[in-house]
Image (tube, rainbow, N blue to C red):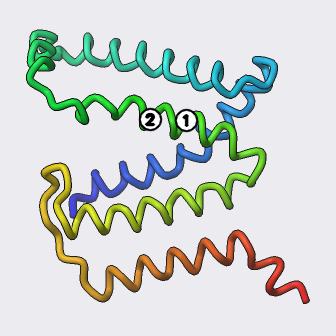
Amino acid sequence: MNSVFTLMAFAIGVVVPLQAVVNNQLKLLLGGSTVLAAMISFAVGMVSLLLLALFSGQKFSALGQLVRGEWWMFIGGLLGAFFVFGTTLLAPRLGVAAMLSLIIAGQVCTSLLFDRFGWLAMPLREVNLPRLAGALLVVVGVLLVNFGDKWFSR
């Protein structure tokens, strides 16, 4: 595993709770509107990516290939909007740790299915006992994060 990519994946994990907290504060600034906060978040992201594309010399002519895309290739933004909206809505209700533990458990379980079945042209990867045990440990962690204080406070 490339250490740069591993570090980048970890860094993304570090910023996810920060994003939820920042977007929650933006929501409060906007009169409690989760939708407006998510919209502003995406607008800032779009401008950031546009600037990155310009400064990194991306070939905008490649966008002409979009007409050849399958319908499902265009729902990434919708899924991202659901994520940003959902985390902005849920962070203050569930708490950041509880919310993210549930999100991570969902990611790990679904990712194992993508690896096993190669959905959407992803490469097949073995789902073996150690990987299943790791997923089970994540689920146990989610249970402890969400219910551990009730179980161990007796």
**Circle 1 residues within 10 Å: few <14, some 14–19, many ≥20:** many
Which residue occupies the extreme right position in the image?
154
Residue at 82% x, 87% y: name it: 152
Q: Is residue 132 above or below residue 51?
A: below
Q: Is residue 44 above or below residue 19?
A: above
Residue at 59% x, 76% y: name it: 141
The image position of residue 140, as x and y in percent, is 57, 80
- Looking at the image, residue 24 sits to the left or right of residue 15; the answer is right
The image position of residue 112, as x and y in percent, is 31, 68
The image position of residue 103, as x and y in percent, is 53, 57
- Looking at the image, residue 72 sits to the left or right of residue 152; the answer is left
Q: Which residue is mark 2?
A: 80
Q: Are marks 1 and 2 in contact (CB under 8 Å)?
A: yes
Q: Which residue is mark 1?
A: 84
Name the quarter where the N terminus is drawn: bottom left
- Badge count: 2
Residue at 31% x, 18% y: name it: 52
Secondary element under disc 1, as helix, strand or loop, is: helix
Residue flagged by tag 2: what amino acid is it?
A: Gly
Q: Is residue 28 above or below residue 145?
A: above
Name the quarter where the C terminus is drawn: bottom right
Q: CA distance from mark 1 to mark 2?
A: 6 Å
Residue at 70% x, 46% y: name it: 91
